[in-house]
Amino acid sequence: MRAPQSWYTEVLRSGDPQWSATTEEIDAGFVRVGFEIEDIETFPEITGPLVIGRVETIEELTEFKKPIRFCTVAVGEAEPRGIVCGARNFAEGDLIVAALPGVVLPGPFEIAARKTYGRVSDGMICSVSELGIGTDHSGILVLAPGTAEPGADAREVLGLDDAAIDVNVTPDRGYAFSVRGLGRELAGSFGVPFVDPGLRSADLADLADDGSVPAWPVAIDENSGATRYTARVITGVDPTAISPWWMQKRLMVAGIRPISAIVDITNYVMIELGQPLHAFDADRITGAVTVRSAQPGEKLTTLDDTVRVLDPEDVLITDETGPIALAGVMGGASTEVGPETTTVLLESATFDPVRVFRTAKRHKLTSEASKRFERIVDPEITAVASDRAARLIVEIAGGRIASPLSETHVQTPIRSTIAIAADEPDRVAGVSYPPGTTLTRLTEVGCVVTGTDELDVFPPSWRPDLRQRADLVEEVLRLEGLEDIPAVVPRAPGGTGLTPVQRRRRSVGRTLALDGYVEVLPYPFMPAGVFDLWDLPADDERRRTVKVLNPLESDRPELNTTLLPGLLEMAARNIARGQRDLSLFTIGQVVIAGDHVAAVEALDVTRRPTDEEIAALDASLPHQPLHVGVVLTGLRDPAGPWGPGRAADHLDAFEAARTIGRAAGVTIELTADDHRPWHPGRCARLMVDGRTVGYAGELHPAVLERAHLPKRTCAVEIDIDALPLDQRLPAPSVSVFPAVLQDVNVVVGGEVPAADVQKALRDGAGDLLEDIALFDVFTGEQVGAGNKSLTFSLRFRAPDRTLTEDEANEAKLAAVDTAAARVGARLR
């Protein structure tokens, strides 16, 4: 919303004639009440003799390729000045602005007497763009008759000691798209009494005829969404009338080009009061004016000479011949006010903001009117704006108000009052405001307030955004100054630190990072069809997804039930960008829809929910366990002078699973399994205390091919929440007695998992076994075809004595016997 500083000054001086403020103070005043200033542009300084002139004679110079005029201009001196000008929009007797030799215009551009087109041009006739107060350079600036006498200082007449202030208006504050609205805010900021220019003006009887012309018939179709429509006839208008300079200047600063007195007045009242208006040529209208929805196939030629095919959702202004305007957006060319117009039908109405917005977008026809209608126009100012515009038309363009105001409206719901405690803003902000602050501030914004301690507040018609107590509190705090609310950092209460669950999560992440893995944050939504690419069975639990009603991306409407799709996508993206050796991990929740998931009704937000309602909400949520996922591809040990490096394989995935288990304080057991998307021959089921907690191993070749990943890519996924959490903190038991180290080499079938052999040895060795580790695997003729040799390191220790070699050997042999019985192992 752009307007000159002088306009705001005029509005505030209606309440305090002595009020004044600098541009910087007005800037700070707007910011103080929550409005951001986009730009402040002061009018450029012009030095030298810039005067008002009157064109005495015009001589057309026809001997040149383009039309040129030689004008004599009276500038208050004994003799008029001769000035050469190419503009065609002025005539003899018009008042113009003349820059005499010695003037320095914005640019800088110095004016001097010079010979051109065979004549001496003793100055320049100026346009608004050359004066730096507008962008229109299509013609020179013509002032209304009687504006000033020739020779008067044009800087004073034009009010060039001014500035354009551009305020950023948020969409919820449509009332601020007017000088009326912003002036009210500025008055509240400076503590100045506000005189509302939107109050009903004096009776128009002195400007009206005897009433012999009946009220123009108007109607609203109930399906149009319009709520109010008014019209009045003004006859005897002078179509050649020129708007006064003060009006032209304000329109140009607002970014609107002056056109004619009638059009300028409708635009001026729109900027002043926020109510868009439209003027029709009444002689071109046939019969009653009706607001209705467009019919399929209807067409309308708008003021920009574009034929528009209308949509049934468009709202039209029509007469008996058909559409004459696109309601709230733009008028029609058939009823345009032109040079021959002497009778005007003045429209002031309120339309449905949503339909205006959609119409403007559909036809790519955003206008100053549509910008205001789509942000909601004050419905109570419709007739006031019509009165204001009618008075200005009669005063500036002549004529008389020939008919009474025609008005029709649709009944709308009456807004209710809002109850609020007088001290609620104090309690919300933590500030003690003076008594009566809430009442005073809400009255300033236009509310009708009754009560003392408990207030009943009726919001004004121009503030549809005030719907609840929180809105009223915000208004009070905003006007009192948000910057005055102290920023108090809350003091954290003493606690016991992280919970065991939090410590476990951090331990897992820290351990993986120290082991060379890089944490990533994959997308929490799954790509469409990923489980089909994995060939998952139809009854697989991972297919029981939760769909989001309004997903960020239409092709990803489902929440993750597993971390692997996001991890694999991230790995593929890194590989495509040249990073081929990857060790990635992520920790995050997955969402699994269970049978208990059910929809619940929306809760009453005006009170705290009951325990039963909270329990119902909790019960409606899907299961959301915390998982950890790992992906390995490329080299696990880097290449270098020491060798070619080592590619990651399924054994690294198994070790990653064990690392996670150790970080979580549990021992993970591995058993062979077939579980998509893992390779059936290189997949391990991860178990703790007989319960499956995840899977690890090499991914299936078909899955890797479809995911555009290298062969032998490995992955791990573990349900952290499924791991037992031991919250006891026993002191560690450390034996002071020496250990006895033994190695054992056993031969088993090639299909027997090493983990099964290790478990059998551990179980058979008894309590004296402190640790067991596999450190060699051998296959060859020495152990027989289809067999393999496994060598384990065993560490024995007694907690209460020095262990002998015989005791250690006895425990080792017992371990071998158990392995022989379980997996057919024999000593090599």
Image (spheres, rainbow, N blue to C red):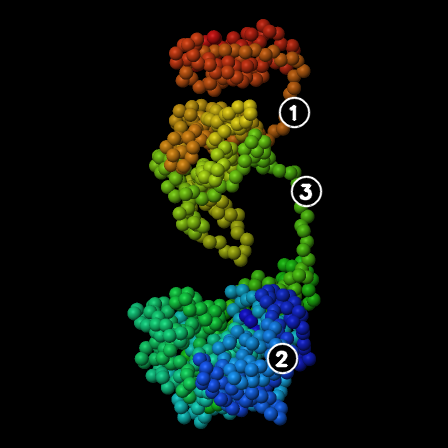
Amino acid residing under circle 3: Gly
Give the labeled residue for mark 1: 731
Give the labeled residue for mark 3: 494
Give the labeled residue for mark 2: 103
Amino acid residing under circle 1: Ala
Residue 666 position (above or below residue 79): above
Q: Give the x, y percent position of residue 556.
A: 42, 46
Q: Give the x, y percent position of residue 551.
A: 43, 50
Circle 2 SS class: loop
**What is the CA distance from the residue labelled 1 to the residue labelled 3?**
26 Å
Circle 3 SS class: loop
Extreme residue in the left direction: 297
Extreme residue in the top direction: 806
Please state, as top left, top right, bottom left or bottom right, where the N terminus lies in the image: bottom right
Where is residue 674, by image quadrant? Answer: top left
Sequence-earlier tag: 3 or 2:
2
Residue 66 position (above or below residue 636): below
Choose mark 3 or mark 2, whichever is in front. 2
In this rendering, does residue 588 appear at all?
Answer: yes
